Amino acid sequence: MRLLEQQNFKNERAVIRVDFNVPLNEELEVTDKTRIQAAKPTIEYILSQGGSCVLLSHLGRPEGRDPKLSLEHIVSEASSVLGLNVNFCRHVVGDKAEEQAAALKPGEVLLMENLRYHKEETKGDEVFAQQLARLGTVYVNDAFGTAHRAHASTTIMAKYFEGKKSFGSLLASEVKAIEKVIKDGESPVVAILGGAKVSSKITIIESLLDKVDHLIIGGGMVYTFTKAQGGTVGNSICEPDYCDYALELLEKAKAKGVEIHLPVDVIAGDDFSDDANQKVFESNNIADGWEGLDAGPKSCETFHQLILKCKTILWNGPLGVFEFPNFAQGTISIGESIGEATKSGAFSLVGGGDSVAAVKQFGLASRMSYISTGGGAMLESLEGKILPGIAALNE
């Protein structure tokens, strides 16, 4: 892994692939600046070494040049976070873009327009990548959230910077955090997986069976496993077509010496809404007309005791419908348990949009060892895949 510190940035113009795909409100103001803050160490390091920075990012999924998805809306927030005046270029490639980039002096930062205004970006177009490469003299990738995509800016353009490309601080720390779980994790290792469907988590579950000692399953997936084992799940979300597969996974886990933990009780509602009537059921005996929406109190206590015994913790996915305050307790409880274990010396990695949203919403973020900025990229890394954006830096 070629780190920033191994590259000389004096009088160099670094093209940095950042991930400024941040949420905007109706007034087109940034509502969460986490991703901009995450890029700050890399940008500051390059500037401190006497370099300048050209920032490349996408924003949303525009159909053509959608003005609502212009990166111009990010400029004031980026300037505020970085504590300097960020210049903006209304182009991504071409003569005007190259002229504005070439005019940068050491210590200056230029943010280019939305990469995805050009369909060539997501197609990984070779000519477009070559044009992007003309914007700088050194390439740095610091966008973990898009490292699993073989796009022009994340993967293809790296080939034009042989010997002059490196991992940004954020990308390097993401890779190290994942390796700390799947390669170097101190035992016992526990993974907590939530989510609605077993079908969407098959590859990660199978991969994790070779890396963990314990696997806690929460969210809607619970009811497919429960039904597979002969339980009644009422109106709970369930994938009957995956019941046989759920049983196979339980057998595979047993053969590998991995303990799978499912909730023993759940909090159910008589409707899918926050103001639904609530009732606690044993997880394998939910009455008709009720649907499981959260882990129950006995389950939370059992999971708490298990998590406190573990030295390495991975959390991906909430335990219930945490968006409804009345069904958020299971997710809050698991977060608090992880926080307590972390305080006692465990390493905890949280990733995936909903898990990250939950730890932020409930004020638990500071109690985790590491919070990943990439959902799909983290999952593919945990599945053992080599991400194209990372492979391109190592070639």
Image: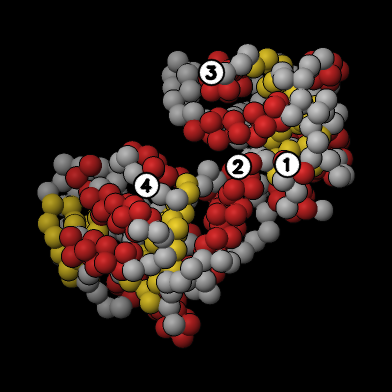
Q: Is residue 235 visible?
A: no
The first of marks 3 and 2 along the sequence is 3
Most distant residue in the bottom direction: 255
**SS at circle 1:** helix
379 is higher (above) or lower (below) than 32: below
- Residue 309 falls in which quadrant of the image? bottom left
Give percent across and percent down for residue 207: 54, 69
Instruction: Identify residue type, mark 2.
Output: Leu
The first of marks 3 and 1 along the sequence is 1
Name the mark nearer the viewer: 1 or 2: 1
29 is higher (above) or lower (below) than 347: above
Question: Are discs 3 and 2 less than 8 Å apart at CB?
Answer: no
What residue lies at 13% left-to-right and 52% top-to-bottom?
A: 278
What residue lies at 74% left-to-right and 29% top-to-bottom?
A: 49
Instruction: Identify residue type, mark 1.
Output: Glu
Return the residue at label 4. Answer: 367
Instruction: Identify residue type, mark 3.
Output: Ser
The first of marks 3 and 4 along the sequence is 3
Instruction: Identify residue type, mark 4.
Output: Arg
Return the residue at label 1. Answer: 5
Name the mark nearer the viewer: 4 or 1: 1
The Cα atoms of the two marked residues, 3 and 4, are separated by 26 Å
What residue lies at 62% left-to-right and 64% top-to-bottom?
A: 384
The first of marks 2 and 4 along the sequence is 2
Q: Which residue is at the front of the view, 160 or 324?
A: 160
How many numbered discs?
4
Q: What is the crowding at mark 2: few (fewer than 14 residues within 10 Å), some, or many (at least 20)?
A: many
Give percent across and percent down for residue 71: 61, 22
Return the residue at label 3. Answer: 80
The scheme the figure's colours follow is secondary structure
